[in-house]
């Protein structure tokens, strides 16, 4: 069965605000999580990953937080821009390139 | 550097037919994986290949098969198509097998009538 899921299917924010997209997982053995972004008509694009020995990782305008106690991770996007409008997926890795994806959150950025 | 290339981009088949989809990975990438994306089931793993060997297979019936060639290019085949096989089929490549950083193509949109 699915091991990752997202809390909200849609999220609408104003341009310039910070966005937070949440994800829960059920498998305590999961040790590697990845966030992807998928724009309309395109394949998913890697954003950032985090391993279970970390609780926070930062990239360019993005931060991923991992709370292993409650099996929750979040993706924070700073100063959200219209180009950030997309579907965001969290995924965990079962092994190799075998990823289990959540349902996705549609992020809409309003000007 | 060119990205992952998938052909054809769009195709329409009828039930019972078979289809072959092609994927050219990023140059230097030896790991190729395939995913099916549908509105109802989301993104689901099909298979993964590395150095012409299938390393992992998802929970799909035997009608779904694939292979990888010595130049890392990959193909997947679906035989005896069913209406439920209508989906976007995504190919992804990566430098190694120990990474979640996959580079996806734009997909092949299959419609089964």
Image (tube, coloured by chain):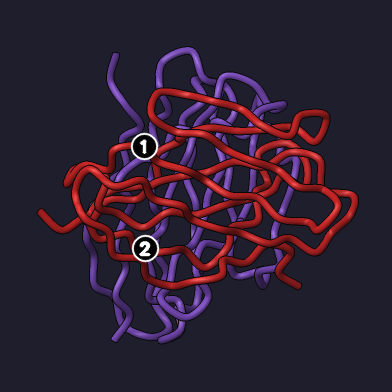
Chain colours: A red, B purple
Residue bearing mark 1: A78
Q: Chain of mark 2?
A: B
Name the quadrant containing residue B96.
top right
Left-right relation of B98 to B26: right
Q: Residue at x 61, y 59 (%)?
A: A23
Q: Is residue B73 above or below residue A26?
A: above
Q: Residue at x 48, y 13 (%)?
A: B28
Which quarter of the figure is the N terminus of chain A placed in? bottom right
Name the quadrant containing residue B26.
top left
Left-right relation of A43 to A7: left
Q: Which of the labelled discs sits on residue A46, or is there none? A: none
What's the distance in space between the residues labelled 2 and 1, CA to CA?
A: 31 Å
Left-right relation of A33 to B110: right
Asked whether the residues under marks 2 and 1 belong to the same chain, the reply is no
Q: Position of residue A91 (x, y in %)?
A: 61, 51
Q: Position of residue A83 (x, y in %)?
A: 19, 42
Decide: few, some or many residues near mark 1? Use Cα within 10 Å; few <14, some 14-19, many ≥20: some
Q: Residue at x 40, y 23 (%)?
A: A60
Residue bearing mark 2: B88
């Amino acid at each position: 069965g699915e091991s990752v899921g997202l809390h909200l299917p849609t999220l609408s924010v104003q341009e310039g605000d910070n966005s937070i997209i949440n994800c829960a997982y059920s498998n305590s053995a999961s040790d590697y999580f990845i966030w992807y972004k998928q724009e309309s008509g395109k394949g998913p694009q890697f954003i950032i990953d985090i391993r279970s020995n970390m609780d926070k990782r930062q990239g360019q305008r993005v931060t991923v937080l991992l709370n292993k106690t409650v099996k929750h991770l979040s993706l924070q996007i700073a100063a959200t821009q219209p180009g950030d409008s997309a579907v965001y997926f969290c995924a965990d890795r079962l092994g190799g390139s075998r990823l289990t994806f959540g349902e996705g959150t549609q992020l809409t950025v309003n000007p | 550097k060119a990205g992952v290339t998938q052909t054809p981009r769009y195709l329409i088949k009828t039930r019972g037919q078979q289809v072959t989809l092609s994927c050219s990975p990023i140059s230097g990438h030896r790991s190729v994986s395939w995913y099916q994306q549908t509105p109802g089931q989301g993104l689901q793993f099909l298979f993964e290949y590395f150095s012409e060997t299938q390393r992992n297979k998802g929970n799909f019936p035997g009608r779904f098969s694939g292979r990888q060639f010595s130049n890392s290019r990959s193909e997947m085949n679906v035989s005896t198509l069913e209406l439920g096989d209508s989906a976007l089929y995504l190919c992804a490549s990566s430098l190694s097998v120990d990474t979640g950083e996959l580079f996806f193509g734009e997909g092949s949109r299959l419609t089964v009538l």
